[in-house]
Image (spheres, rainbow, N blue to C red):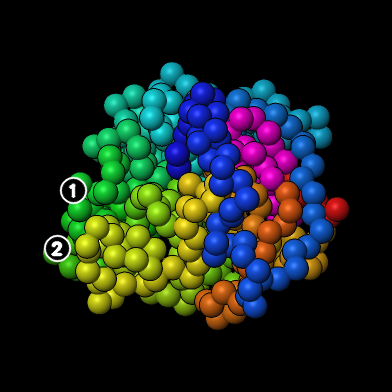
Amino acid sequence: MKVRTRSSAIISAVCLVASLALTTASADEPSAASHKAAGVELTQVATAQNPIAGTAGPGGQVWIAERAGTVRVLGAQGLGRPVLDISAETTTDGERGLLGIAFDKGQKHFYISYTDLEGTSTVDEFTMRYGKIQPNTRRTVITQTQPYENHNGGDIKFGPDGYLYIALGDGGAGGDPHGNGQKLDTLLGKMLRIDPNGAKPYAIPADNPFVGDPNAKDEIWAYGLRNPWRFSFDAGTGDMFIGDVGQSEWEEIDWASARSGGGENYGWASMEGNHPFRGGTEPANHVPPVFEYDRLGLGCSVTGGFVYRGSKIPELRGQYLYSDYCDGTVRSLKLKNGKVTGHGDLGVSGGEVISFVQGGDRELYVLALGGTISRIDPA
């Protein structure tokens, strides 16, 4: 994630105006792989203060996290009053704040992912009762010190296996100065997989790929990630998709089959997408992205989304939707057996797209950091 101020966004737009006729080559240029996009529109359903993440909650309602530390529920009249407020416990300096929310299976527990006032990545748990958060049940599940104020990652999701997956960036600065992406003795630059209900504070699933390796952290599921800002599981197949923000040239989308046993090395910081980074050597076990795009156009920071499994737009079913924070265009990928067979542009822009949300009915919402919450509807 790259969080820009209004002034920096304007400056960037001025600098890029000369290239408006150019678009991200691998995503937009006509080719045999491009496909006709479904007719969609974005229907604004609410506004918020820097909406940054969301999830499906009790009764199928969409819960929205605001970056400063509040959580609100989306209803017919828009967002209600905060059901949780940790704004005194976090900061929006750099890329910090309340960064992710999730419910476990059965929605018995609610989880928040945030950086505390010292910048430490933290995941806390609350018990749910009658669809409401029980504040006095709060406990900390896991923490990770962050050396810098960017590349925190922070997304959290429960997988089809019932375990909690946590995305952490490489620690920040630029170019992974500590080499965290390829190190297995740190949680930074990784996708983690833990069982928060198996023990206190959590248990390690016995089939995690590095269990028993004295040189690796047992929590690691996959590694070689720079800033996996948003990831998701396909509600139809269980496959995992990760939008990993690039350094300066390439944005990438990574994929893992639901049958994966973990251990994937997505290459950072030896690789940026399919390309050696600063003279790096491709690791022998590198798992290349299923899709990448360069920054010749307006794109600068990929925002991973979801495979569409809703019912309102049948022609979109099975396609992976994503965007870019700087470009804002909602795009789609068609995949078969982990290979991209087509890519397209849905012809709508969500603004500074910071996240996607999958509702209880599996329809998708687009969050713009500026405040707009929109639903993807048929045109």
Between 352 and 220, the one nearer to me in the picture:
352
Q: Residue furthest top?
A: 88
What is the x, y in percent for residue 8? 48, 28
At 56% across and 46% down in the image, what residue appears?
19
Magenta segment range? Answer: 349-374
What is the x, y in percent for residue 179? 20, 53
What is the x, y in percent for residue 53? 56, 40
Q: Are marks 2 and 1 in contact (CB under 8 Å)?
A: no
Say which residue label 2 marks: 215
At 63% across and 50% down in the image, what residue appears?
21
Q: Residue furthest front?
A: 18
* Mark 1 surroundings: few (<14), some (14-19) or many (≥20) residues within 10 A: some
At 55% across and 29% down in the image, what residue appears?
10
Q: Amino acid at mark 1?
A: His
Name the image quarter holding the N terminus: top left
What is the x, y in percent for residue 177? 20, 47
Between 200 and 283, the one nearer to me in the picture:
283
**158 in relation to 81, above or below:** below
Disc 1 element = loop
Say which residue label 1 marks: 178
